[in-house]
Amino acid sequence: MPLSLLLLMAAAAAPGPQTFDLSAASPLRRQVYRAGGHGMEPGGTPSDYLFSVALPDGNYRVTLRLGDARTAGDTTVKAEARRLMLRNVATRKGQFVERSFLVNIRTSALPPPPANAPGGRAVRLAPHDAQEYTWDEKLTLEFLGRPQVGSVTIAPVEAPTLYLAGDSTVTDQFAEPAASWGQMLPALLDDQIAVANHAKSGATLKSFLTDLRFDKLLSAMKPGDWLFIQFGHNDQKKEWPQTYVDPDITYPAWLRAYIAEARRRGAHPVLVTSPERRNFDTDGKIKDTLGSYAAAARKVATEEGVPLIDLNADSRVLYEALGPEAAPTAFNAGGVDKTHHNDYGAWLLASAVAQRIRTQIPDLARHVTMPVFVPARPPSAADVAIVPSLIHSDQRPAGS
């Protein structure tokens, strides 16, 4: 069946606006989610909870009426696998406000290839991927802090989509305390653009293709969309011989292939240099472990005429501004991990990305809502407090 027909069928199947009463007294707050319907997910508390609605692939506008006649609130909202959408929306007793944002959701299904053609019918997921909120048949919203949610309206929407292709420093990390910049980016943009984070932990330029993740991303891409490409951490591993790419020849060639695929569909490619690892020398400077790959990405961006988000440079400035003693507070596993971040570190990197969008990509700059961010003067962890998710590492499905 032609892809155009499949897309038309999917559009026809998309439901109209749906409004749900999520006030404290609503019976819906006690209704358990069942496949194909809507309701509450397990793991909630009397105040914090997860609410899901079965929906087909696509972008959806979520509009919330926040507030309560009798109680003040402070509402944080995350979507799917802990994507931060709204942070600390305060409402006084008797005050009501409306907030909206866009959420991209997907399943693993692919338009099937013609008979005898290579390809697949679905993304090649790891066993745990299929059990997470990212790839299921529903849109999941997580309400945290002191949430006061009167109602939620969900409606399909046509909007520009910002696709993310990358590795564990970009992906929607499943559980606390890990987080990545791709998870934080939606909260720094307005409600006129959707972020579709297809990045995967351990991914390389090659494996992102062989797992059919790039196929899934491209199958939904349309003219006017954006593709942010960030690889390097795993591509440089010579001990992974099937996916290793050298920075001089094969890494630039693969980047150009991704750029070409986006351009063929009328989308706008953007290269992102990989954030550096937290390794300080005796002078308090960050050691170089990814510089040759960052340099290669910069060169390709110049030669291909595509925007560059130089996160490698910004991460070095950030970590050195924090210093060897404070920098661990931005990293996962209590600072033991030197590559992956917690909520604070992910927020800092996402802020650096958003600031680069503001200065380097005029057509996207108008969607950035955060204040000006200066990597050399990062806010403290206390200033960037983000309510932890209900999903913790000890809840991760077995085998992950």
Image (tube, grey):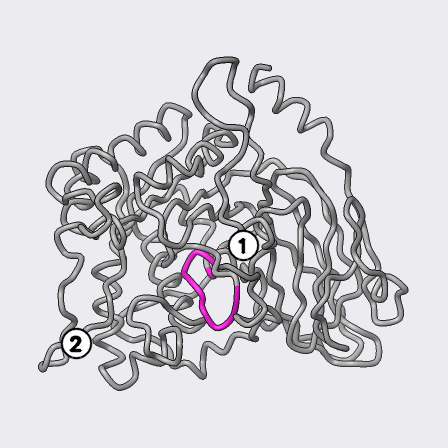
Q: Tell me how many marks there are.
A: 2
Disc number lying in front (1 or 2)? 1
Q: Nearer the viewer, residue 264 or 209?
A: 209
The outermost residue toward the front is: 399
Tag 1–tag 2 contact (CB < 8 Å): no
Q: Is residue 36 magenta?
A: no
Q: Nearer the viewer, residue 131 or 368?
A: 131
The residue sitting at 39% across, 40% down in the picture is: 227
Quadrant into which the N terminus falls: top right
Q: Nearer the viewer, residue 21 or 289?
A: 289
Could you tell which of marks 1 and 2 lies nearer the N-terminus?
Answer: 1
Judge from the rendering whether residue 140 lies leftward or rightward of residue 302; answer left or right: right
Q: Main secondary structure of the magenta part?
A: loop
In the figure, residue 71 lies in which quadrant? Answer: bottom right
Judge from the rendering whether residue 397 lies leftward or rightward of residue 97; answer left or right: left
The residue sitting at 52% across, 61% down in the picture is: 174
In the figure, residue 372 lies in which quadrant? Answer: bottom left
For label 1, the residue is 128
For label 2, the residue is 280
The residue sitting at 52% across, 32% down in the picture is: 220
355 lies above or below 262 = below
Judge from the rendering whether residue 9 lies leftward or rightward of residue 186; answer left or right: right
The residue sitting at 17% across, 37% down in the picture is: 250
Does residue 62 show up? yes
Local SS, label 2: loop
Q: Which amino acid lies under the numbered mark 2 shown in the image of this protein?
A: Phe
Q: Position of residue 311 (x, y in %)?
A: 27, 57
Start-end of magenta stretch: 175-184
Local SS, label 1: loop
The outermost residue toward the bottom is: 325
